[in-house]
Amino acid sequence: MVEFRYNEENDTYIGLQRMRSYMTNTPEQMWIRPVPELKYLNAENVHRYRLLMRYFYQQYKKLRYWLSPEEVYQGVLDFGLIKDYTLEQCQQDLESLTEWQNLTNRHDGSKASTVEEYLRKKFRYLLTPYSIEIERMLENLESIQGYGGSLEASLFDQIVEWLKQINDMLDQDKDFEGALDLWKSLSGAFKQLHENASDYLASLQTGKAEELMMTESFLVFKDTLTHYLRNFIQGMQKSSYKIEGYLRKISLNEEQLLDKITAEQERLPNLEDDRTHEERHAQFEAEWQSFKRWFLGEGNELSDLYYLEQATKETISKIVRAVLRIQEKRRLGTSRKRELDYLGQWFFAIDELEEAKELAAYTFGLYKTRHFQGWDEPMNDSGHSSMWDESPMIRHLRSRSRKQIKRQQNEPVRQTKQKQNETREIYLQKQKEEVEIIEQLLEKEQFSVSDLKDVSRPLRNLLLYWIGRCSSHPSRNMDTPDGVRIELKMPDNEKRTKLTSNDGELELPDFAFKLMRIQASSDDINKNSHHLRRNYLDHANEQQAKISGM
C-alpha cells in the first residue's frame, strides 16, 4: 500500500511505502523489529486512543475505510464514555496514531474551492493491517472466559477425507485443479483440532477445575466428562492409522502437490504480496512438514498425536482419582458402630458353625483386607484347603486412644536362644532331606515327571523350583551348590501329565530331567559354601525376627 503525507516544509507530497518495506523483511527480521503499533495500548491517554481505534475497526467491518476527523470525533462522542473531548484533541490523537503507524492518511481536497483550501492540511484516515489484527485480537480477548476449546473427534474424520481427496488427485495422471482449496480445508481442520484440544485439556488443569473436582457436585459431572474424553480417544485411535497411511502415500508425490498449490496461489491477484515462487514454496513445505511431524513424528521423536492421547488418558485418570477422593471423604465421616453391632448380634444368634462360616465369607470376602500385617505359614499348598484349617496369626495391637497411657516399666530383654536352636534344627533337617532326595534322583540320572508316583511335598517343591530356574535360563540348566547339574528338557508335542502328592494333584507339562555330578573348582566350592552359609543366615535371621515379634 502506498501512503501520501503532506510536507509543510516544501509543500510537496511524499509517498511512504511502509507496508511494502515490512513485507520485504525476512521472518527472522520481523521477530526482532520494534512494534510501534502497540504503543497506543499503554499511552498516557489510552482511553481516548482505544475509543478511536475501536470506532475505526467497527467502521472497517462495515466496509467504510477512509474516515474524516469530523466523522471520527462524532463517533467517539456517541460512545458516551468520555466528556470534554474536543475536535482539536481528536485531530492530535489521530496524528499520534498515524505516527505510531496505526493509521495511514491521505490528503482530502474533494471539497476545496480554492488553491489555498486545497493546500490546507486536511486528511482522511485508514486503519493499517497491523492495527486491524490488533483490534481483532482485542475483540476476541474480551469474549474469552477461561481456556475454552473442545475435543471434536469429527475433525479427525474431516482430515481423513481431505487427505483421501488429495491422494486421489495425485494418483490421476491428468492435471488436477482445486489443490489450494483442499489445502486450506486441511490446514483449517488441523489448526482447529490442535488449538481446541490444547485449550480444552489446559482448562482441566486450572485452579478452578481443581477446586470443582474436590466438591461433591463434580460426581454428577464426572460421567459425562469421562464419556466425552473416551469418545475423543476412540475417534483419534480409529482415524490415526488412516491418516498415517494417507500421509505416507502423499509423501511420495509431495513435491508435485506443493508445486501445484504454489502455482494456484500465484494466480490469485494480491497487490501487497510480492514474495517469490521459492518463498511461497518454502512456506507450504514447512507447513506440510509440520503437519506430518504432528501425526507421524520425526526420527526417534514421538508424534504430537501420541502426546495428545497420553494427556487425554492422564486427564481421565485424574478425574477417577478425584472421584475416589470424594468417595473416601464421604466414608471417613460414616460411623460403622450400628452396623457392626447388628453384625455381631447376627453372629451371636447362629448356632451352626457352617452357617457362621458362610456369613463370614459374605461379610469379609467382598473386599480386600487393607493394612493387614503378619506372616503366612501354610500347612499345605493345596488350593482346595480352607482358611479355617490354617493356624491363626496372633498379633498384639497397640491402642490408638488419645488418652495418655501411664508409662510402664521397661520389660527385660527376652531370651530366644532356645527358639533359635529349634529353628536351626528344623532348617538343617530340611537341608538333609533335600540332599537325600537329590542323591536318590542321581541314581536315576534321567527321568520324566510322568515317571514319578505319589511324590512327597518336599520333592514336589524341589521339582517346581528346578523347573522355574531352568526355564528362565537360555541353556535350560542349573547347578546346585552341592555340585549337581540339572538339565531340563521340554516335552514333545506339548505332552502333559499329573503330579500326584499327598495333598492333591498338579497338572503340568511332562518335563524331562537329567542330573549329573560336576567337578567344581576350589573357587566354586568356596562360592557355593558361602552361598549356603548366606542362605542359612538369612533364614535364621528371618525366623529370629518372627520369634522376637511373638
Image (cartoon, rainbow, N blue to C red):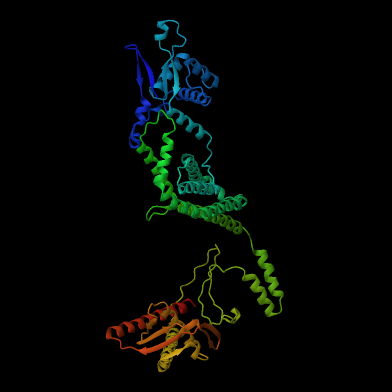
Residue 286 drawn at (x, y percent)? 39, 43
Vertical comparison of 391 with 22: above or below: below
Query: Horizontally, is 334 left or right of 234 in the view?
Result: right
Relative depth, front residue between 311 and 494: 494
Q: Can residue 41 be seen in this view?
A: no
Query: Horizontally, is 353 left or right of 437 in the view?
Result: right
Which residue does the image show at 58% across and 56% down from the upper left? 329
Q: Is residue 386 visible?
A: yes
Which residue does the image show at 51% across and 74% down from the upper left? 374
Relative depth, front residue between 69 and 50: 69
Query: Horizontally, is 316 left or right of 439 in the view?
Result: right
Q: Which residue lies furthest to the left in this view?
A: 522
Q: Which residue lies furthest to the front in this view?
A: 174
Disc tally is 0
Residue 179 drawn at (x, y percent)? 47, 41
Residue 103 drawn at (x, y percent)? 42, 23
Which residue does the image show at 41% across and 54% down from the upper left? 302
Q: In which quarter of the image is the N terminus?
A: top left
Residue 536 drawn at (x, y percent)? 39, 82
Vertical comparison of 176 with 355: above or below: above
Relative depth, front residue between 29 and 453: 29
